[in-house]
Amino acid sequence: MTGDGSLTSFEAASSEPYTEPATYTVLTHLREQIVSGRIPPGSKLRAEALASEMNVSRTPVRSALAVLSAEGLVSYGVNRGYTVLSMKISDIFDAIEVRASLEGLAARLSVDLGWPPEGCGALQDLVERGRAILDAGAWSEAIERDWYALNRLFHRAIQRASQNSALRNAVRMTLVYPLFADPARICPTVADHVPPRLRQVPDTPPAFILASQRDHEAILDAIRQGDSEAAGRQMSDHVLATKARLHAIATR
């Protein structure tokens, strides 16, 4: 991001939607509301009310609801409309496993296709900015969101570099848990199984974030060295580390 908070040209490209802009905006908003529990399971989603609330026409809302239905976050029934589905923690773990395979493939394909110097430089910039946040030594909900924003851009950039729209769409189908902060705290499906003491926001960067940053740096090194197998393997392991951590701290 630039100093005024706007996206750089690379970041805008990395976060380019797979749908029309209005639909993407609505889709992103609704998905985050659902996976964070702000719109709880069982809620009825009516296009007219959502369009009025978000100050858009009903067309992008209907398109977004159809996507959410395909992603398994809502169900559709004739005469019943769209309803938010409940999610089990096993669903989250399953989604992470699939995402790990897909993102590993994306990393490998991106290296096989070759990264242009400007793309690799921009990816390095994201990694360095993430490192700078952690090296500052402080942590809070706001800082967490900043780091996760860079994290999303890092992953999206590699997915786009795979030049495989089917793969990117498949990754999107696995986003049934929030990627804008720690899911152990903000995803009710997970948080309900995690002891309160493990859901607190610490004053310094937590160990799992430090490890994730090191993963980003290792993935970047593999990409710069042109080692597609290492990049793919490290990316898969990186994503699976989230499942391992959540599984370790979740109670039954």
Image (cartoon, helix red, strand yellow):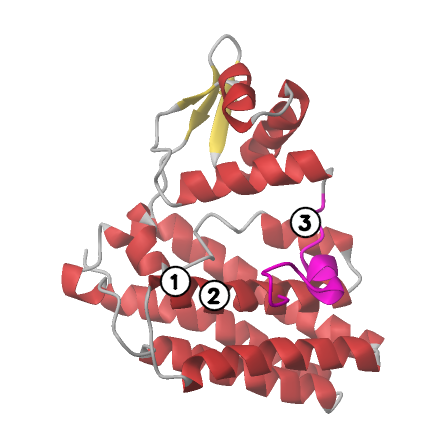
Counting from the top left corner in percent of width and height, residue 227 is at 72, 88
Name the element at disc 2. helix
Q: For the residue marked with disc 3, what is the amino acid? A: Asn
User: Of label 3 and label 2, which has the lower sequence position?
Assistant: 2
Q: Quadrant of the N terminus?
A: bottom right
Q: Quadrant of residue 252?
A: bottom left
Q: Give the class, few, some or many, for how many residues have Cα within 10 Å of label 1's Cα (few <14, many ≥20).
A: few
Instruction: Based on the picture, tell me whether residue 9 belongs to the magenta stretch.
Output: yes
The residue located at (47%, 47%) in the rendering is: 176
Name the element at disc 3. helix
The residue located at (78%, 58%) in the rendering is: 164
Up the image or down, 231 lies above or below 17; here it is below
| Disc number lying in front (3 or 2) | 2
Mark 1 and mark 3 in contact? Answer it, CB < 8 Å. no
Mark 2 and mark 1 in contact? Answer it, CB < 8 Å. yes
Counting from the top left corner in percent of width and height, residue 30 is at 50, 36
Q: For the residue marked with disc 1, what is the amino acid? A: Ala
Counting from the top left corner in percent of width and height, residue 70 is at 59, 35
Give the magenta range: 1-18
Q: Is residue 122 visible?
A: yes
User: Of label 1 and label 3, which has the lower sequence position?
Assistant: 1
Name the element at disc 1. helix
Q: For the residue marked with disc 2, what is the amino acid? A: Asp
Identify the main secondary structure in magenta.
loop
Q: Which mark is residue 146?
A: 2
The residue carrying mark 1 is 142
Kindly give the residue lying farthest to the top in the view shown: 79
The residue carrying mark 3 is 169
